[in-house]
Amino acid sequence: MRLKYDVDTKILFQIGDPLDQCCATYLHNALYEFCNVNAVNLSVPVPKGGLGDFVKAAKVIGAAGFDLTMPHKSAIIPFLDECDPASRAFKCVNHVKIREGKLIGVGLDGAGMGLSLQYEQGDIGGRHALMIGAGAVAGPIAADLCARGVKKFTIVNRTVEKAKYIADTLREIYGADTTYGPFTEEYLSQTAPDITLAVQCTCLGGGSHWQEFPHLGFVDLLPKECIAADVLYPTTTFLEAAKSRGLPTVSGKGMLYQQQLAMMEFYFGVKLGPDALAEAIEALEVAIALRGVRNERRAELASMSR
Ligand SMILES: NC(=O)c1ccc[n+]([C@@H]2O[C@H](COP(=O)([O-])OP(=O)(O)OC[C@H]3O[C@@H](n4cnc5c(N)ncnc54)[C@H](OP(=O)(O)O)[C@@H]3O)[C@@H](O)[C@H]2O)c1
């Protein structure tokens, strides 16, 4: 544990509202310590509409940056001096660094999945990607895949206009070859034989709810070399179907860990190798456990005061 902070300590924040379910502050502080970076991260609830005041205050105190969760991920965009085109287009910025009074924003969800795929499966350039879902994480992931050499995309979604938006944006920014369609068994089956990377980006088929992923028949039509990836973890019905076909699979856990490494590089220029992954995994698990203890104590105190 760092025992003292001094005038050189960089101050960073995690902001959002509510922050009850967030544990990024524990995680970030553990990684700062692991990398011997003289910095501290503090959780600050900032309500909707409070972003302007927070930005002014952060500049006045010389903060080095802040990461954002709901409801600020897209509201921050007008305040930024610099932002990559994909994070701006998909309105998904979750980290901001402040340098010489300028706000530089980035979304790292996409990098998390791209780095995880690369780490677990090697070079993915030249593949034809099927993006299943077109919610907040799908666009940034597709953009990161583009940057890693994936130039052909099929995007499917229940709400087809959202798939169209991603397809149009990837074409405009990266010159990618894109097509889109409905999230139906028929469309998925028609597309499957050409796909060499399938990325499941909906909230279906995983987690404690195991909400049904309705169309799994297409998995049988994917080629043997197709990588099946999912934003959810530890496993999902999609990943299980892919595994039973013998396809290589990548769960969303790596996406979560790799974002932490990308975050250290973004804020501090610290490039961590794969050996740091174990540290990120441990830090995350400790962070989740500490969040559980904190929330239990809060609930206990609340029931005692009733
Ligand atoms: N591993 C990680 O590090 C990581 C990071 C971020 C997020 N995630 C996970 O990624 C998942 C998606 O996050 P998000 O922010 O993109 O969520 P989101 O913006 O709410 O998008 C949800 C997606 O799921 C689709 N969907 C939801 N219910 C459906 C249903 N009954 N039938 C068909 N499609 C349905 C939505 O389709 P419509 O557009 O038609 O509504 C949309 O494509 C979440 O479960 C989140 O926990 C993981």
Image (cartoon, rainbow, N blue to C red):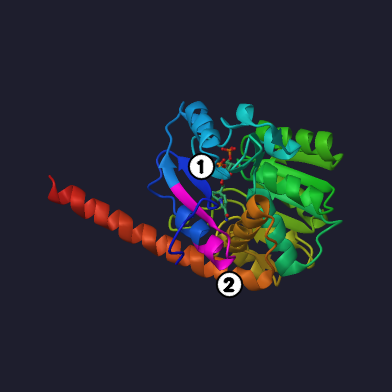
* Closest to the observer, 66 or 18: 66
Q: Which residue is denoted by mark 2 in the rendering?
A: 278
Magenta-drawn segment: 30-42
**Is residue 73 covered in magenta?**
no
Quadrant (top left/top right/bottom left/bottom right) for the C terminus: top left
Residue 244 visible at all: no
- Say what amino acid the circle numbered 2 marks: Ala
Q: Which mark is residue 69?
A: 1
285 vs 35, nearest the viewer? 35
Q: Can see residue 300?
A: yes
Q: Position of residue 219 (x, y in %)?
A: 69, 60
- Residue 35 located within the stretch drawn in magenta: yes
Say which quarter of the image contains residue 125. Answer: bottom right
- Residue 29: x %, y % from top left: 49, 58
Amino acid type assigned to the residue bearing label 1 in the image: Thr
Dividing the image into four equal quarters, which quarter contains ligand 1? Answer: top right
Asked which quadrant contains residue 158, the reply is top right
In the picture, measured across the screen, residue 176 lies left or right of residue 294, that is: right
**Distance between the Cα atoms at labels 2 and 1?**
25 Å
Q: Residue at x 70, y 62 (%)?
A: 271
